[in-house]
Amino acid sequence: MRARDVRAIIFCAATTLVLLAGSYLLLQSALISLALGGAWLAWLLTRPRMQRVIRRLRGEPDWNGYFKND
């Protein structure tokens, strides 16, 4: 696993936790916090960078040549 993949996964997890905690503290509603967290994850996980990370985690080859395999 590449270092940039690990950083992308950590960013995804950390920002989601911060969003959930912050929105719960501000709005005092678990339902709204979960909805915001779900929307954030839906947006974040559909970004091309995260799509490439997910494909590499599944073991699919990266044929587009966007990144060099060092």
Image (cartoon, grey):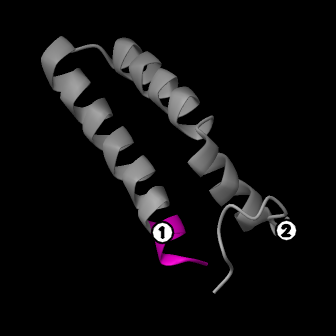
- Mark 1 or mark 2: name the one nearer the start of the chain: 1
| Gap between marks 1 and 2 measured at Cα | 17 Å
Q: Residue at x 63, y 43 (%)?
A: 48
Answer with left or right where residue 10 lies relative to residue 61: left
> Which residue is at the front of the view, 38 or 29?
38
Q: Is 55 included in the stretch rendered in magenta?
A: no
Residue 50 against residue 32 in the figure, above or below: below
Residue at label 1?
4
Picture coordinates of residue 30 (x, y %)? Answer: 34, 19
Instruction: Check disc 2: other Cα within 10 Å, few if <14, some if 14-19, many if 20+.
Output: few
Q: Determine the secondary structure under disc 2.
A: loop
Picture coordinates of residue 44 (x, y %)? Answer: 51, 36
- Among all residues in the image, which is located at the extreme left? 26
Q: Residue at x 49, y 58 (%)?
A: 9
From which residue to which does the magenta span run?
Answer: 1-6
> Which residue is at the front of the view, 6 or 34?
6
Amino acid type indicated by mark 2: Pro
Q: In the rendering, which numbered label is found on residue 56?
A: none
Residue 15 against residue 38 in the figure, above or below: below
Q: Residue at x 68, y 61 (%)?
A: 66
Q: In the rendering, which numbered label is found on residue 61?
A: 2
Q: Determine the secondary structure under disc 1.
A: helix
Amino acid type indicated by mark 1: Arg
> Which residue is at the front of the view, 23 or 47?
47
Picture coordinates of residue 35 (x, y %)? Answer: 45, 17
